[in-house]
């Protein structure tokens, strides 16, 4: 029997209704949630992502401010904009769209965001909260994946999770969140000698590398939950993930598609984090 589809788009729609209702209640109480988005340069993919985020805010009754800066904007100017958003009490969250132009130091810029407004969860402070399991913003993509795993209804405790990829925004934090839920976690990456031998042991397989068709059917344990975080553009311009979808679908128990899987959930978690931040503003 082919795998069940982990429909991130449908789950996102349902969750966004609840987020919008909470945002409305907050606005009625005098605290309308607000997100500032900073886009530097004219990367076409980033422009699309940012437009989607701003539209999602409007649909969820979250106010948004889009700060578009030229490619050659100096670090000083970027930091000044972040400082203004930090000081503005109507702003609950600040997102600096990545990647940044090469002359800008991403770490220095992300660190300038006030920890109470780090709804993207990419500051060292937020990473520390993930490691220690304490209160703080979790990065949006891992949070979205956890929500999708919850939607399967399957237990995570004692299951073997393999994370392929070790990025700061996805690979490392999703491994830690799975560990927090008592999964046994293995991280794999470009230096792992026999990737297929590792992935075949996975009850939960997270593919977060950014290489089209890296995960083939022979690399998947029958019945496994397969989450595809990859966003790759094929020669014909269409999007595909890191997983060979049609073939793996015949083996896995659950599989998330690209597009329509993790992507919509990432934006949903950004909205959720922004609303949580506004709740903290109302009742610290
Ligand atoms: N670029 C692509 N995805 C993301 C994301 O989730 N956050 C930020 N800040 N930049 C991104």
Image: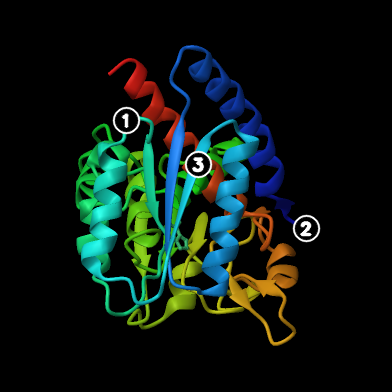
Q: Is residue 111 left or right of residue 158?
A: left
For residue 87, above or below residue 142: above
Dot 2 corresponds to which residue? Answer: 2
Please tell me which residue is depicted at 24% across the width and 55% down the height of the picture: 80
Question: Badge 2: few (under 14), some or many (20 or more) residues near its Cα, within 10 Å?
Answer: some
Question: Badge 3: few (under 14), some or many (20 or more) residues near its Cα, within 10 Å?
Answer: many
Instruction: Give coordinates of residue 81: x percent, y percent.
Output: 30, 53
Please tell me which residue is depicted at 68% across the width and 38% down the height of the picture: 13
Instruction: Give coordinates of residue 101: x percent, y percent.
Output: 36, 76
Helix, strand or loop at label 3? It is strand
Please tell me which residue is depicted at 41% across the width and 81% down the height of the picture: 194
User: Cβ(mark 2) to ligand 1 < 8 Å?
Assistant: no
Dot 3 corresponds to which residue? Answer: 64
Q: Nearer the viewer, mark 2 or mark 1?
A: 1
Dot 1 corresponds to which residue? Answer: 89
Helix, strand or loop at label 2? It is loop
Looking at the picture, tell me which residue is in the foreground, 181 or 140: 140
For the question of whether residue 54 can be seen, the reply is yes
């Amino acid at each position: 029997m082919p795998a069940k589809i982990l429909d991130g788009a449908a789950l996102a729609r349902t969750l966004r209704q609840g987020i919008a209702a909470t945002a409305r209640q907050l606005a009625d109480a005098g605290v309308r949630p607000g997100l500032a988005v900073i886009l530097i340069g004219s990367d076409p993919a980033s422009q699309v992502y940012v437009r989607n985020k701003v539209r999602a805010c409007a649909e969820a009754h979250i106010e948004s401010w889009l700060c578009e800066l030229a490619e050659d904007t100096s670090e000083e100017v970027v930091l000044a904009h972040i400082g203004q958003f930090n000081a503005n009490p109507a702003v609950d969250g600040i997102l600096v769209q990545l990647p940044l132009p090469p002359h800008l130091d991403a770490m220095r810029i992300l660190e300038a965001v006030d920890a109470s407004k780090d709804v993207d969860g990419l500051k060292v402070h937020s990473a520390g909260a993930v490691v220690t399991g304490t209160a703080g913003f979790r990065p949006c993509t891992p949070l979205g994946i956890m929500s999708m795993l919850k939607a399967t209804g399957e237990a995570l405790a004692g299951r073997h999770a393999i994370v392929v990829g070790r990025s700061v925004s996805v690979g490392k934090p999703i491994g830690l969140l799975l560990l927090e839920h008592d999964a046994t976690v293995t991280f794999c990456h470009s230096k792992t000698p026999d990737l297929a031998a590792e992935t075949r042991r996975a009850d939960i397989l997270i593919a977060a590398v950014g290489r089209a068709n890296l995960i083939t059917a022979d690399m998947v344990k029958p019945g496994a939950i397969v989450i595809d975080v990859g966003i790759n553009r094929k020669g014909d311009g269409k999007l595909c993930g890191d997983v060979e979808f049609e073939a793996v679908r015949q083996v896995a128990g659950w599989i998330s598609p690209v597009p329509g899987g993790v992507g919509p959930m990432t934006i949903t978690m950004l909205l959720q984090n922004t609303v949580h931040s506004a709740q903290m503003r109302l009742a610290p």
